[in-house]
Amino acid sequence: MAADETRTPEPGQVPLAPLPDHRNVHTPWWQELWRRHAHVITPLRARGLQCDIEFGLSTYNVRVSLPDDSYLVISPPHDPPSERPPGEPEGWIATREHPDDQMLFEVIYDSAPSNDPGAPQRPEARHGGGAQPLIEAIDHRLAQLGLLPHPVLPHENSHVPPAQPSPLPPRVLPPASPKAAPPARRTP
């Protein structure tokens, strides 16, 4: 993670938002989850948005702090549970929420496959687990709200390739059960 630390950028590079400040940042399981979600996290950090990994209802989520104290929760579908590895879901769901305003709940992006054969197909569903359309939808909505600290410029490429298979043994990943998961913040 040393290479991921916030540092003075080279000329022409955008500085990344800082890493989270908690005890799990230096643990192997958290670093592995961070690496598996880098294709989502890195473009957001390049926009000045601080990100973290946390355990949600049944999945590992990316939590993105926004300048107005609201936050994004970017997660794979929760139901049915997926057998896919963290960071490589069949779809993404991005919501905007606020801890003090329970009325604020906005779905920004949803590319999760529908389980209801009678439901109309969402336009984002064709993108599945692709990160690029997710990042573009987040950029668009946060720009509309004036919440994008460092917007991506037309000549910049927000695409980051998906994570490569981990060289670490599977036992490094945290348990899938919320009861056995290490202490972490839970999404509301």
Image: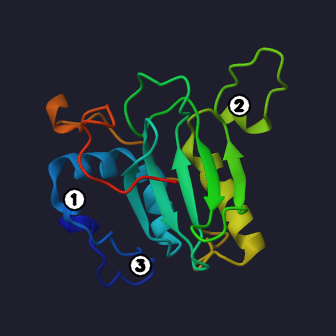
Q: Residue at x 64, y 53 (%)?
A: 95
In this rendered view, identify the residue nearer to me: 7 or 108.
108
Q: Alpha-carbon distance for marks 1 and 3?
A: 23 Å
Q: Amino acid at mark 3?
A: Pro
Q: Amino acid at mark 2?
A: Arg
**x%, y% of residue 66?**
56, 73
What residue is disc 1 on? Answer: 24
Image position of 98 (left or right of 5): right
Image position of 124 (left or right of 179): right
- Which circle's residue, 1 or 3, is located before the other in the chain? 3
**x%, y% of residue 177?**
31, 31
What residue is disc 2 on? Answer: 126
Outermost residue toward the top? 117
The image's mark for residue 15 is 3
**x%, y% of residue 57?**
46, 40
Up the image or down, 57 lies above or below 39; here it is above
Q: Using a 10 Å C-alpha cutoff, classify the residue at mark 3 as few (fewer than 14 neighbours), some (14 to 19) or many (20 or more).
A: some
Q: Using a 10 Å C-alpha cutoff, classify the residue at mark 2 as few (fewer than 14 neighbours), some (14 to 19) or many (20 or more).
A: few
* Label 2: element kind: helix
Marks 1 and 3 in Cβ contact (< 8 Å): no
Q: Is residue 158 visible?
A: no
